[in-house]
């Protein structure tokens, strides 16, 4: 690459970074504000995002023009959201189970991929609501997950660009490096330490939880990259400037929030997922 070719590439990289930062400065405060309000507002945001994830997944696998598949999945997610807003988790699970059956039965091709996409979106929806549901610890638990995912992404980005070195998994994600993975992991531990210092939990469990969620977030990112590479797609969409689509932005969060919800549920039940994550 000549000096003249390198300059435009560097300029494009700087513009992309600026767009990423600008989008994050707008979207992150909105997400935090809605998460703090909780209730039906948070459930509505999560449901809209879940529908977006499902549609983008269908775009990646090449079946987004199948109206019956798109509609049946979206309707099931809306019904699930209404049930979650009323705190009827049992009814929500029923709606999602029927939705999964519907999209599978209506799929003319790539049935397994379509069902996986719906399950992915549905898991993200119900997990995000369950973590926030607890009135005492829900917001703090949700913020822990969000911040761990965000700093894992940010730390990985800057460590990867600044240090470089061996690639993490070049066949799946050519730009990701081991330095980036370790940098993101280290950043997540800083968040856990900050929560412990603020009296929001015990240091040991929080460090372990942040470490596990950071790894899950990075694996979620790699999973989405593998799906896109399987179908020859670069970005899931271009809805978020500098970030691509919702799948590109939320892949790590989906993996982390689902794992967090499972862990919190096992410790404290469906109505105490946040407490199960934060109280030891």
Image (cartoon, rainbow, N blue to C red):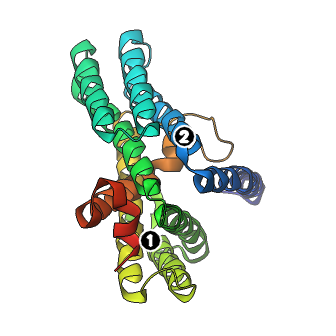
Q: Residue at x 40, y 41 (%)?
A: 87
Q: Is residue 209 above or below residue 73?
A: below
Of residues 83 and 228, the one nearer the viewer is: 83
Point out the tag, 2 or 1, that comes first from the N-terminus: 2
Q: Secondary structure at mark 2?
A: helix
Q: Is residue 245 above or below residue 269?
A: above
Residue 17 falls in which quadrant of the image? Answer: bottom right
Q: Secondary structure at mark 1?
A: helix
Q: Are marks 2 and 1 in contact (CB under 8 Å)?
A: no
- Number of marks: 2
Specify whether residue 250 is in view.
yes
State which mark lies toward you, 2 or 1. 2
Of residues 112 and 273, the one nearer the viewer is: 273
Specify whether residue 169 is in view.
no
Quarter of the C terminus within the rendering: bottom left
Percent x, y for residue 48? 53, 33
Local packing at callout 2 (Cα closer than 10 Å; few below 14, some 14-19, many 20+) is some
Residue 222 falls in which quadrant of the image? Answer: bottom left
Of residues 12 and 24, the one nearer the viewer is: 24
Q: Residue at x 44, y 53 (%)?
A: 133
Quarter of the N terminus within the rendering: bottom right
Q: Is residue 157 above or below residue 71?
A: below
Residue identifier under label 2: 40
Residue identifier under label 1: 181
């Amino acid at each position: 690459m000549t000096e003249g070719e390198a300059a435009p590439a560097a300029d494009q990289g700087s513009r992309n970074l600026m767009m990423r930062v600008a989008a994050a400065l707008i979207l992150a405060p909105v997400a935090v504000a809605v998460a703090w309000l909780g209730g039906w507002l948070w459930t509505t945001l999560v449901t809209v995002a879940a529908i977006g994830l499902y549609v983008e997944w269908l775009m990646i696998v090449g079946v987004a023009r199948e109206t019956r598949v798109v509609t049946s999945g979206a309707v099931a997610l809306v019904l699930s959201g209404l049930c979650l807003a009323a705190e009827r988790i049992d009814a929500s699970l029923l709606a999602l189970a029927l939705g999964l059956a519907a999209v599978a039965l209506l799929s003319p091709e790539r049935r397994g991929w379509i069902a996986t996409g719906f399950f992915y979106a549905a898991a993200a929806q119900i997990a995000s609501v369950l973590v926030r549901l607890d009135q005492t610890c829900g917001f703090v638990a949700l913020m822990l997950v969000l911040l761990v995912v965000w700093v894992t992404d940010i730390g990985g980005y800057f460590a990867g660009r600044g240090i470089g070195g061996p690639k993490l998994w070049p066949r799946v994600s050519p730009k990701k490096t081991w330095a980036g993975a370790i940098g993101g992991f280290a950043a997540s531990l800083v968040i856990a330490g900050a929560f412990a210092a603020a009296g929001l939990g015990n240091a040991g469990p929080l460090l372990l939880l942040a470490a596990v969620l950071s790894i899950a977030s990075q694996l979620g990112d790699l999973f989405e990259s593998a799906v896109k590479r399987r179908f020859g797609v670069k970005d899931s969409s271009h809805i978020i400037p500098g970030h691509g689509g919702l799948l590109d932005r939320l892949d790590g969060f989906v993996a982390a929030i689902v794992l967090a919800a499972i862990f919190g549920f096992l410790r404290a039940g469906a109505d105490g997922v946040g407490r199960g994550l934060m109280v030891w």
